[in-house]
Image: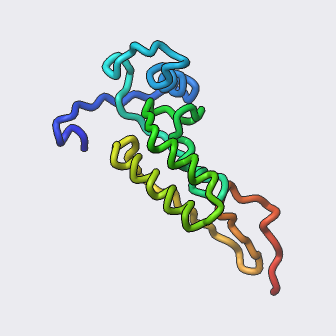
Amino acid sequence: MLEDVGIPVRLLTSEWRVYLDALEGCNRPAQADATRSPAECSYNLYRMGWVMDYPDAASMLATFRPGSRFQYTGWESAEYAELLDRALAEPDDALRADLYAQAERVILQDAVIVPLQYYDRTVLVKSGVRFDYPPFGPPSLQYWARGQD
């Protein structure tokens, strides 16, 4: 797809730890040589995923905050950080949701990430078994129960 628009592509694969070390070496100046240019890195585009672990937009958006241990992009924005700070301190749900939406727009306008996919879950459950699939995190047997026959 990228080659169709004139961007040469060379795919690389590696073990997970090697992959994370490469991301940290190019995108975390505090932990690496801050003089490295993108051309010196083994990649300029990479795939990373995240799954919400609690029901608040901060679960996703805080990963892009400067200083986050999950922030591999090298991107920083004072406006974004300020919006997150305000959202985290805002007790009103509607106002907090608006602040998170503004922060998300900053990420998308700066083209920091390209959302590519959304994970969906399909579950087959035998009749007579009640299973409430949790909206966040992995399923646990504590959610299974024998239903009425």
Image x and y of residue 133, in percent: 68, 67
Residue 110 visible in this rendered orientation of the protein: yes
Q: Residue at x 49, y 32 (%)?
A: 72
Q: Residue at x 51, y 44 (%)?
A: 82
State the quadrant of the C terminus.
bottom right
Q: Does 146 sit left or right of 124 as displayed?
A: right
According to the image, what is the colour scheme of the structure? rainbow
Image x and y of residue 122, in percent: 57, 66
Q: Nearer the viewer, residue 103 or 72?
A: 103
Q: Residue at x 40, y 53 (%)?
A: 105
The image shows residue 127, relative to residue 115, as above or below, that is below
The image shows residue 36, relative to residue 136, as above or below, that is above
Q: Does 7 sit left or right of 134 as displayed?
A: left
Q: Residue at x 62, y 67 (%)?
A: 123
The image shows residue 41, relative to residue 99, as above or below, that is above
Residue 51 visible in this rendered orientation of the protein: no
Q: Does 112 sit left or right of 19 as displayed?
A: left
Image x and y of residue 64, in percent: 51, 40
Answer with the quarter of the image where residue 37 lies: top left
Residue farthest along the bottom direction in this orientation: 149
